[in-house]
Amino acid sequence: MSNKGRTTPRIVCCAIPIARAAGKVLIITSRKRPNNWVLPKGGWEPSDGVLEQAALREAYEEAGVRGKITRFVTTIPSASSTYHFYELDVAELEQEWLESKERKREWVDYAEAVQRISWKAELAQGLQLSSLAPKR
């Protein structure tokens, strides 16, 4: 992947939206690849301040989710981006949100989520390090 003219990798903040009581994770369709599923994620912007705020913003914009960041999961570097993963305990799910006409969303169990997002290795790796993963 290219760095699109950047000299340093892009900072990407990723939310792992969780319904703890149900043990489910919310996944969304990719805008670029509508048949593929992803976790809400996007670039950190200076107006976000901290990385956690970027993860919250992306979850709201892309999935209509509001909640609380409860855990830093991991940082995964790649050639073009550095991914920062955060668990987000979902408190509210908006019926209409910024990208609701461009994406689908679905609550699935952990194993299903890993399977559906496995096309994007960094996302699957981040989810596999979350507290939803079976204990080893």
Image: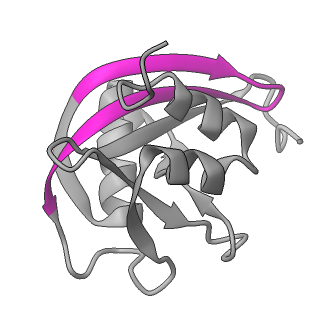
Whether residue 87 sits left or right of residue 32 in the image: it is left
The residue sitting at the left extreme is: 91
The residue sitting at the bottom extreme is: 101
The answer to whether any part of residue 44 appears in the image is no
Q: Residue at x 89, y 41 (%)?
A: 2
Q: Position of residue 22 (x, y in %)?
A: 21, 50
Q: Position of residue 66 (x, y in %)?
A: 18, 54
Q: Nearer the viewer, residue 132 or 124?
A: 132
The reply to whether the magenta stretch includes residue 71 is yes
Way the structure is coloured:
one colour
Question: Where on the picture, by quarter, is residue 53?
Answer: top left
- Characterize the magenta stretch by its predominant secondary structure: strand
The residue sitting at the right extreme is: 1
Q: Position of residue 127 (x, y in %)?
A: 51, 34
Question: Where on the picture, by quarter, is residue 37?
Answer: bottom right
Q: Residue at x 19, y 72 (%)?
A: 94
Q: Position of residue 10 (x, y in %)?
A: 67, 32
Q: Residue at x 27, y 44 (%)?
A: 23
- Look at the picture and state if 86 lies above or below 96: above
- Region rendered in magenta: 70-92
Q: Residue at x 44, y 87 (%)?
A: 101
Q: Nearer the viewer, residue 28 or 64?
A: 28
- Look at the picture and state if 19 lies above or below 46: below
The answer to whether any part of residue 61 appears in the image is yes
